[in-house]
Amino acid sequence: MVDNPGGSHIIEKSGEFRSGGNGVGETVRFHRRGTGGAAEKPVELPESVIPGVARICALGLGLPELLDEICREVAALFGTECCCLVAIPAGGAPVEVRRFPGGGETAGLRDVYRELCLREEILSRLRDEGPLAVPDLSALSPDDPVRALFEPASVRSLLVVPLRIGTALNGLLAFHAIGSPRSWEDGERRLAEEAAPILAAALERKTMEERLLASEARYRFLADNALDFISLHDLEGSYLYASPASRRMLGYRPEEMTGVAADAFHHPDDLPKLREGNRRLAAGEGLSVTVQHRLRCKDGSFREVETVSSPVTVGGGEVRRILRITRDITERKQMESRIFEGQQQETIALLAGGVAHEFNNLLVGINGTAEMLSLLLSGNEEALQYLSTIERLGNRAVELTRQLLAYARQGVRTPELLSLPRLVTEDFPALRAALPSSVEIRLELDEGVPPVRVDLFQLKQVIVSLCLNAAEAMPCGGTLTIRTRQEDTVPEGPRDATGPSGDGIERRLFSGGEFPGPWTFLDVADSGAGMEEATLKRIFEPFFSTKFIGRGMGLAAVRGIVENHGGAIRVYTEPGKGTVFSIGFLGAEGTPAAEEPREPPPLCGEGTILLADDEEDVRDVVRAMLESFGYTVVTARDGQEAVEIFRERAGEVDLILLDMMMPRMTGAEAFAEIRRISPGARAILASGYDVQGAGREFASRGFSAFLQKPFRRGELGRKVGEALGSGSRGTSGES
């Protein structure tokens, strides 16, 4: 349509309007007369623009493309120089302005309409009064906001039609004349207003579609990139949706889980609590349910997970779906288990150390009394048999306390350079005698492995315990193999880990990091029945045994000794084929010394010894032992009394024997006070606690020696003789 300002118009109608047609409708011919009164060629205007707009809306275009096509269509139908379509989203989102034609002198209109959407006085006028038709902007007052807004963009005439959804304004349809004025006929306004609700609905629908798509894209991005596994289930539990995290967590692709019942992936033992959670959600008994359970991976293993389930409701609140967010807590549970185990071991070790101390004090009295009675009743064979039984049982009790202290990692260590192959060879006869004849022992010893620096007695205890354990695993006989070998490193890994290895299961302890070698390993292998994983995880617990009668602290002591030496343990087992225990120590430089000659018999001598112990029975027995060597003994009930006695008789006392833990004043505190009285005083510290490095530590405090309870008479005599520097050997033999 072309307009001639100031001219007249002739309107003719032709054709017919078909509401369901394909874009063909009744047309209106506008004739514009020129200034001389002659009518120009008529421009046809359709009776309705609905078919054309509907056709464009059906194309499935995005919002910007949709606005462009509608602008082009409407501009062509109206024959206008410029058309703008403005989308005004709700919620303060950016305004979308499309125009046709898109460039040239109409380029500034985008900014004009963005500014217009901020002018409430203009928007309220459009909402309240309807279309805004201005034939000539110059006819408006210079202060008019419409003129002030559009005139800088070279707009001379405009028709702006509001697009409404209800009472809300969601867009504008605008036509412009650039450079020259133009009047807007009733037919044009009618068609524009007729198109307005269709365009408003199209804008609303397209805006909602794009918001929905954007929302879906955001949530899909979150679901696809979340570390947690997100899933949607029907009330029967089947997967309706599984996020990509399923592949990372379980090894399943999402499509492998969709449509499958969730129970197929759950551990059978967890099904009751999971089903109860579903029942509660379906019944509306909570906003969420949190359950810790296990999910089966594609490789057949299980992961520990924590799942938060929430109901998905529709309509009046009826639960139709269940949303689950599942987090892998396997590593967290393993860490908690290790922390708990460490705390448990620390508690048991503390208890074991305390029990061992009390036992050791008792055993000083029991074993010492038996030894003294053996001396007194040397001619009574019947009495000596009973005393021998007491001593044998007492020695077993001593061994148990040593195992308790080894597990508690409180053992006094006297490390020395040792050759594992030589030690095994030297102790082989004793091992052979200790094991059933149905067990064949094979030695595969590599003499070239590096020596190790360990405590000789504790290493022997480890070897014996492992061999006895292996023999017990073969009640009907079998083969026990002892081998030595070298490894360059201990691989990096957790402090305690159990898992598949080859055809069996392996447990590694105490590595905690990669340590360069060389390492020397001692393997003790049996051909027994092997172990299940559950058993393997408990074998180092005190007194744990799969047999009715077990050896109690054996393997627990092995663990304590090896850890106390900074070593490593590996246990490899195959059910039905046997088990291999491997203990490793860091190789040391140097050459192991030859075996030292047997210690000399106890020394007898003379002199006065001040004995301080808070246990009366212990004082009496130790006093009798010392007197049997020819010493004069003065006793004190605690450290403070010992200091008082020494202050009075300092010139008489040659040596002080102090218990470490006593009321009022400890042995170390008492000796410090005695040294203030007589800096040259000599003392031996004794204790039922097995304190690592005690000999070196208390030597630095001035003690001549450390004496571990329970001690035998001969050991006491040697320590005292060495401390006094006695030169005369006694004739009473070691008992």
Image: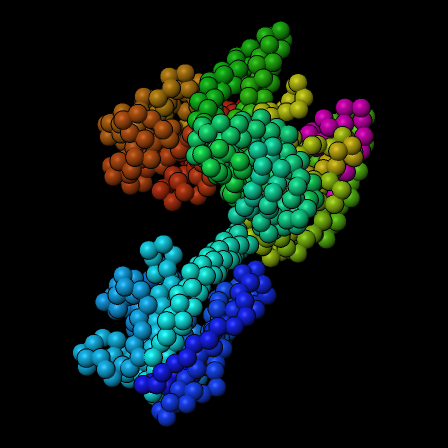
Tell me where residue 700 appears, x and y as whole percent.
Answer: 38, 45
Q: Which residues are magenta?
A: 467-483
* Residue 479 is one of the magenta-drawn residues: yes
* Residue 584 is one of the magenta-drawn residues: no
The colour scheme used to paint the residues is rainbow
Question: Which image quarter: residue 455?
Answer: top right
Tell me where residue 180 appears, x and y as whole percent.
Answer: 34, 87
Looking at the figure, which quarter contains the N terminus? bottom left
Looking at the picture, does residue 489 appear above or below residue 399?
below
Q: Identify which residue is drawn at 79% across, 35% down.
A: 577
Looking at the picture, does residue 133 appear above or below residue 279?
below
Tell me where residue 731 appears, x and y as whole percent.
Answer: 54, 25
User: Left of 642 or right of it: where is 562?
Assistant: right
User: Left of 526 or right of it: where is 709?
Assistant: left
Most foreground residue, 77 or 338: 77
Q: Identify which residue is drawn at 48% across, 38% down.
A: 314
Most foreground residue, 482 or 188: 188
**Extreme residue toward the bottom, this view:** 36
User: Left of 75 or right of it: where is 143?
Assistant: left
Most foreground residue, 229 or 123: 123
Task: Confirm whether residue 19 shows in the render.
Answer: yes
Q: Identify which residue is drawn at 34% across, 57% down.
A: 168
Q: Identify which residue is drawn at 64% across, 34% down.
A: 263
Tell me where residue 40 appears, x and y as whole percent.
Answer: 45, 87
